[in-house]
Image (spheres, grey):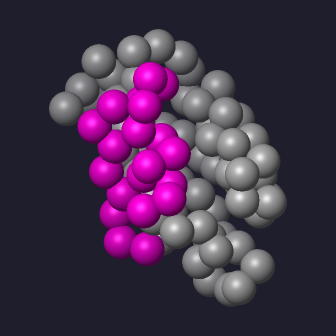
Amino acid sequence: MPAFIALLRGTNVGRATRVPMVGLRDWLTGPAYTRVATHLNRGNAVIRAAAGRPVQHAAGIANAISTSLKVEVPVIVKSGPPF
């Protein structure tokens, strides 16, 4: 299963863009993503997904954060080696 790195830009640098890492990890863990690991409090996560391109994952994660937390956060997803 391919690995991806999700980078949430500009999170947790001010009150307006707070994204709790526990909440992010819980939201990402499920049918779409497995083996989710967040890193520090920076808005970075390593995920595994069975299918999809990085741009699709970025759009889905950004949309979910916007919908659930009411925070607009740019998301960049890069593909990586399986882990």
Decide: is 80 above or below 43: above
Asked if the magenta segment contains residue 25, the reply would be yes
Specify the farthest residue to the bottom. 14
Q: Is residue 71 left or right of residue 51?
A: right
Q: Position of residue 72 (x, y in %)?
A: 79, 59
Residue lying at 58% horizontally and 58% vertically, measured from the top left: 8
Residue 21 occupies quadrant: bottom left
Residue in front for this viewpoint, 82 or 32: 32
Q: Is residue 83 left or right of residue 15?
A: left
Please state, as top left, top right, bottom left or bottom right, where the N terminus lies in the image.
top left
Asked if the magenta segment contains residue 32, the reply would be yes
Residue lying at 71% horizontally and 85% vertically, measured from the top left: 15
- Regarding residue 80, the answer to whether it shows in the image is no
Q: Position of residue 4 (x, y in %)?
A: 41, 35
- Regarding residue 15, the answer to whether it shows in the image is yes
Residue 30 occupies quadrant: top left
Decide: is 45 above or below 12: above
Residue lying at 24% horizontally and 26% vertically, measured from the top left: 82
Decide: is 69 above or below 75: below
Q: Position of residue 22 (x, y in %)?
A: 42, 62
Which residues make up the magenta segment? 22-41
Decide: is 47 above or below 41: above
Residue 81 occupies quadrant: top left
Specify the farthest residue to the left. 83
Residue lying at 19% horizontally and 32% vertically, measured from the top left: 83
Q: Position of residue 46 (x, y in %)?
A: 36, 45
